[in-house]
Amino acid sequence: MRRLTFSSTSPKMDEEVLLKLETKSLEVLAEALDTLEAGFVDLPAFDSEPDLARLRTVLRDVAEKMRDNFPYFHPYYAGQMLKPPHPVARLAYMLALWINPNNHAFDGGRASSFMEKEAVAEIAKLFGWKTFLGHLTSGGTMANLEALWIAGQLKPGRKILASDQAHYTHQRISAVLGLRFESVPCDAKAKMDIDSLIQVLERGEVGTVVATAGTTGTGAVDPLPEILELRERYDFRLHVDAAYGGYFVLADNLEAGTRKAYDCLTQADSIVVDPHKHGLQPFGCGCVLYRDPTVGRFYRHDSPYTYFTSSELHLGEISLECSRAGASAVALWATQKMLPYLPGGEFARSLGKCRQAALILFERISGDPRFRMIFPPELDILVFASNGQKASEISARSERFFEAAAAENLHIAKFRYPAALLRGVWKDVDLDQPQVVCLRSCLMKPEHKDWADRLWEILDRTAGRIN
């Protein structure tokens, strides 16, 4: 047990809070290992005992090194997209490492390959897909790369479009794949601007539009209903990057316009979701899905030594990656068994709590003249800034706020927001620089809802000190 000490002028926060990492579940892991070992009792024994003394020394060194971290697992961490894996995912992943399966082919990951297929099918069901092609990847970057690679195969020579608030990976991936790319301006709510999109589509050069269901900057959801209407007229593929926001399809407290966009996901041509974001999985675990399973023809290849244990399609035959951690599939499968993707279920309710935490803090911050808001949170990302009359003044205060909050163990993030998107929102601000440093919180832990008051106390005190 170690002590988390809060430095504060508030007597309430001067207490030393006892913090204990969760370890009771390790007892369950030991039981599961006994069950796993029983499946191999027919094999002759061999000496595989580690040197426990050296192991203990090295692990203590590792633990010492790992203390040099922000408390990503704690509700006081509300900065980047770092959500602790569920205990069942953590344990299942560790359990799988005693086998260390490789899901490239069935002979390297027999059980875990079938678990991956089942787990991916559960994700596809979120979007109403029963017939599809999909697999896990090492993360959202690789998943989006595969989706854009297929887009380039189906629409050769045509442009890829994404909003200028979409993840930077789309432009970079397009360059890697030799695909032409163009960014589309956003509106005042950081969503792809439809009029600007139409102007680009009118040139007749576009093969694929990338819509984002939850941008990593602000959590904005692109206007999918309007984009789908344009697809009928301009005949492009629609790829949805829902790496961060995909699971919110289960949330029951979205605004009506956002819900309408999520209801359109079933009509996308391809979708990317990251279970290692809101899916409670360890890094790295991404997923790419295609509505048309016949795109598997572009993956077709042969290997003289891997694809011989089954006549079924091996996962390596529908993936650009070769070796992939079967442990990721095992962890995801186990999590889905414990927390099924059911409307109104425990998993769905936890997403609603994340969004509710963002709404609670939005109400507090937007009602305080020491802060400036841009727009309400659409999912669970909240972007705000310290007040000021000039962009440069707001940026400087946000920088100080960031440091002061960290001194009280509240870790948020900074976000350079384009001043051009603020002209119609902050009409009284002199936008004297092209970007404004804002503050950004990813309230991705359901515990953030119950800790909202404590988070606000720190924000309140910090604002009082820097203003």
Image: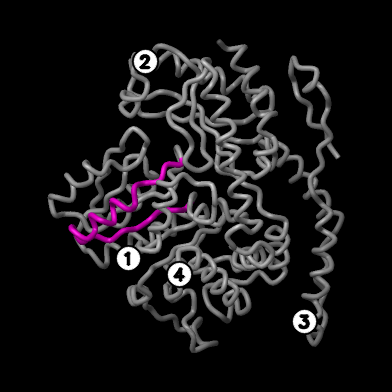
Specify the label residue 150 is tagged with: 1
Label 1 – label 4 distance at C-alpha: 12 Å
Residue drawn 69% across the image and 68% down it: 96
Residue drawn 55% across the image and 58% down it: 285
Looking at the picture, which amino acid does disc 1 mark? Ile
Looking at the picture, which amino acid does disc 4 mark? Gly
In the image, residue 293 sits, relative to residue 163, either above or below, namely below
Tell me the element at label 2: loop
Which span is picked out in magenta? 219-243
Between circles 1 and 4, the one closer to the viewer is 4
**Chain-order first, disc 3 or disc 2:** 3
Question: Crowdedness of circle 1 by 10 Å Cα count: few (<14), some, many (20+)?
Answer: some
Residue corresponding to mark 3: 39
Looking at the picture, which amino acid does disc 2 mark? Val
Residue 86, image x and y in percent?
Answer: 68, 55
**Chain-order first, disc 1 or disc 4:** 4
Classify residue 424 as left or right of residue 28: left
